[in-house]
Image (spheres, helix red, strand yellow):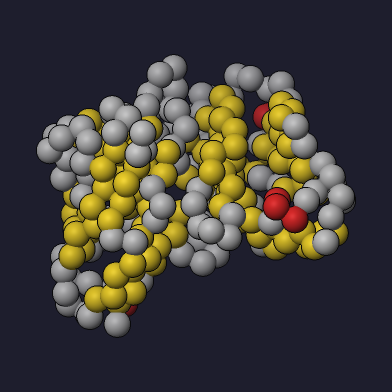
Amino acid sequence: NAGVTQTPKFQVLKTGQSMTLQCAQDMNHEYMSWYRQDPGMGLRLIHYSVGAGITDQGEVPNGYNVSRSTTEDFPLRLLSAAPSQTSVYFCASSYQRGGPGELFFGEGSRLTVL
Amino acid sequence: AQKVTQAQTEISVVEKEDVTLDCVYETRDTTYYLFWYKQPPSGELVFLIRRNSFDEQNEISGRYSWNFQKSTSSFNFTITASQVVDSAVYFCALSQPYGNKLVFGAGTILRVKS
């Protein structure tokens, strides 16, 4: 099993450019989410989804869009990149059985916005 | 609102020392879940443990042990006889019973020197 696959692993953008971080999971998990990791701040939730067609905002959603058209895919779109969006992004998936299961994370995508 | 505090930003120990990483959480929920994750220098996030609020038994897994105390809202992690391979960033996280929306602490950097 591939688990959670994120692409690209590295990306450099100029301010104002847009891009999409791709995330796919093959474990048939209901839940998928995007986190960003910044030094000294741990991981913060950007957006999450509890199933196909259902998404909601997390703690830091501004500047990002998501959609969940299938169970497997959960892309994260940066609409107009800003230097404050320089970060490492992690996609995660999980199940819910008798409570939240462990998050399975992708390898991360390091984004630099100049 | 939920909050996780890992007051120790960085800890350095010499190999074979025991080390405890502190985690204090805040929540108004009576049912919640606590997690620990490890992030080695390679950057991936590795699940270590999941514990629900009704299970206050301490857990031991090899050199790792966890002490959950609801009275002090703490979920501390101890590594016995630390090894260089334990060097990593360790995150404590908290979740409500549904939605798998984890709130992470800022993380503790553990450096184990040989």
Q: Is residue B103 left or right of residue B69?
A: left
Across and down, in percent, residue A13 comes to 24, 76
- In terms of depth relative to the viewer, which is nearer, A9 or A62? A9
Q: Quadrant of the C terminus of chain B?
A: bottom right
Number of callouts: 0
Residue B74: which quarter of the image? top right
Q: Is residue A43 left or right of residue B17?
A: left
Residue in the image at 28% along x and 56% along y:
A7
Q: Is residue B15 visible?
A: yes
Q: Is residue A46 above or below residue B56?
A: below
Residue in the image at 24% along x and 57% along y:
A21
Across and down, in percent, residue A6 comes to 31, 51
Q: Is residue B99 visible?
A: no
Across and down, in percent, residue A111 comes to 33, 68
Residue in the image at 60% along x and 19% along y:
B54
Q: Is residue B68 above or below residue B90?
A: above
Residue in the image at 55% along x and 64% along y:
A40
Q: Is residue B55 left or right of residue B16?
A: left
Across and down, in percent, residue B17 comes to 87, 51
Q: Is residue B93 above or below residue A10?
A: above
Q: Is residue A36 above or below residue B95?
A: below
- In terms of depth relative to the viewer, which is nearer, A95 or B104? A95
